[in-house]
Amino acid sequence: MKRINVAITGFGSIGKRVATLLMARHQDYRQRFSLDIRITGVCGASAGLIDANGISRERLEDRHSFVPSVTGPTFIDCVPADVLIEAGPSDFRTGGPALAYIRTALRRRMHVIAISKGALALDVEGLLNESHRQGVSLRFSGATAAALPTIDLLQYNLAGCRVTQVEAILTGTTNLILSEMMDQGCTFEEALQNAQRLGIAEPDPSYDVEGWDTACKLTIIANAIFKAGFNVQSLPRTGIRHISPNDVQIWKAQGLMPRLVGFINHSGDATDGGVELRLFPQDHPFTYAHGKMKAIRVVTDEMGELCVMGGASDPLATAAAALKDFEHTLASMP
Ligand SMILES: NC(=O)c1ccc[n+]([C@@H]2O[C@H](COP(=O)([O-])OP(=O)(O)OC[C@H]3O[C@@H](n4cnc5c(N)ncnc54)[C@H](OP(=O)(O)O)[C@@H]3O)[C@@H](O)[C@H]2O)c1
């Protein structure tokens, strides 16, 4: 049976779940794809493991078995892998460690599944071009709202028609805060503290509440699908910090629901977009996207208007979205 070796960079909350799911599906993949999937390398910030025969579950779970300095170039230059799953930190200003991992993996003709957003937000077009040059795939559902299909919807389901508008709720944390403010009458600070208590918002919530997370995901989608040339740092962007109890009272009286959305308008050769706080009437589907829910609405010339909502918004769903990409990658292998 043919072997497929997988490397994982970034072995935190998501990377570990990806490894667990891969191992749990080992037998299933043997049956469905006639492939023997092995994890041959994992690394964190300062240590990692490489074993060309495959790493056992026990060694993956024992951080003491990790070898110091098996990370960075030492790791990605040597790991014997057909597929890289990148789950390290997201840094949209520099691309973070993911940029070098993905570039090297593509140059080494590995298929890549990216879950971190920074490298893609900075240069998804360049990375896609490199993947085409090398004849391998680059997929990134985990980086573009995970359980909510965004890239797949635009690339596969709506292939064959012209997409003119995209509008999407892409960040579960901000949607949860807005929902709490509207439904429970909380202030922004109270709703944020609640989200932090539940472990949904980060201790430093600025990336989410200032709209950067939505801007990164939108940039990746726009640049990958429309070659829009968006730059995260110059994209028009608003957050939700400024919303006051008075705003909430007025919107409630008017029957309007606030949602932080990323939007893309695509007409002719021009594409523009940004991140905005938009107010939706009672009968709009986004009004029903409560809590951590995400949603995407797409307008096309030929297939009309579509809306997809829901999907879990947590680490397991993100890991599963990466495995969706992995299965598509396996299915496309000769
Ligand atoms: N959490 C979610 O629900 C979610 C959803 C969608 C996308 N994402 C994205 O997925 C990525 C991972 O998220 P997470 O929640 O798993 O974060 P996390 O728990 O903080 O894990 C990050 C991992 O990256 C490792 N790392 C840091 N620098 C590295 C380097 N130079 N080389 C290799 N590994 C390095 C860390 O290593 P150490 O363990 O040694 O510190 C850690 O294992 C992030 O980019 C995030 O934006 C997360």
Image (cartoon, helix red, strand yellow):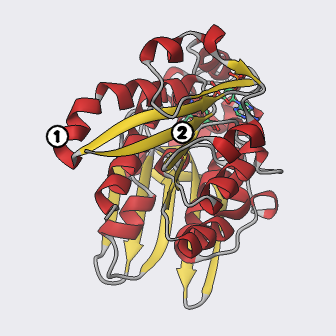
Count residues near mark 1 (Cα–Cα under 10 Å), then give few for <14, some for 14-19, many for 20+. few
Ligand 1 lies in quarter: top right
Relative side of 8 to 28, left or right: right
In front of the other: 223 or 119: 119
Label 1 or label 2, whichever comes before in sequence order:
2
Q: Position of residue 251 (x, y in %)?
A: 56, 42
Reading the image, the residue beneath label 2 is 7
Q: Residue 89 carries which label?
A: none
Helix, strand or loop for disc 1: helix
Q: Which residue lies furthest to the bottom in this view?
A: 268
Q: Mark yes or no: residue 27 visible.
A: yes
Q: Which residue is drawn at 68% across and 58% down?
A: 103
How many labels sit on residues?
A: 2
In front of the other: 114 or 330: 330
Reading the image, the residue beneath label 1 is 31
Count residues near mark 2 (Cα–Cα under 10 Å), then give few for <14, some for 14-19, many for 20+. many
Q: Determine whether the beta carbon of the residue marked 2 sits less than 8 angstroms from the nearest atom of ligand 1.
A: no
Q: Where is residue 128 in the image (x, y as percent from the top left)?
A: 59, 68
Q: Which residue is drawn at 65% across and 17% down?
A: 66
Task: Specify the quadrant of the image occupied by residue 30.
Answer: top left
Q: Is residue 267 depicted above or below 94 in this figure?
A: below
Relative side of 211 to 39, left or right: right
Instruction: Kindly identify the amino acid type of the residue bearing the numbered disc 2.
Output: Ala
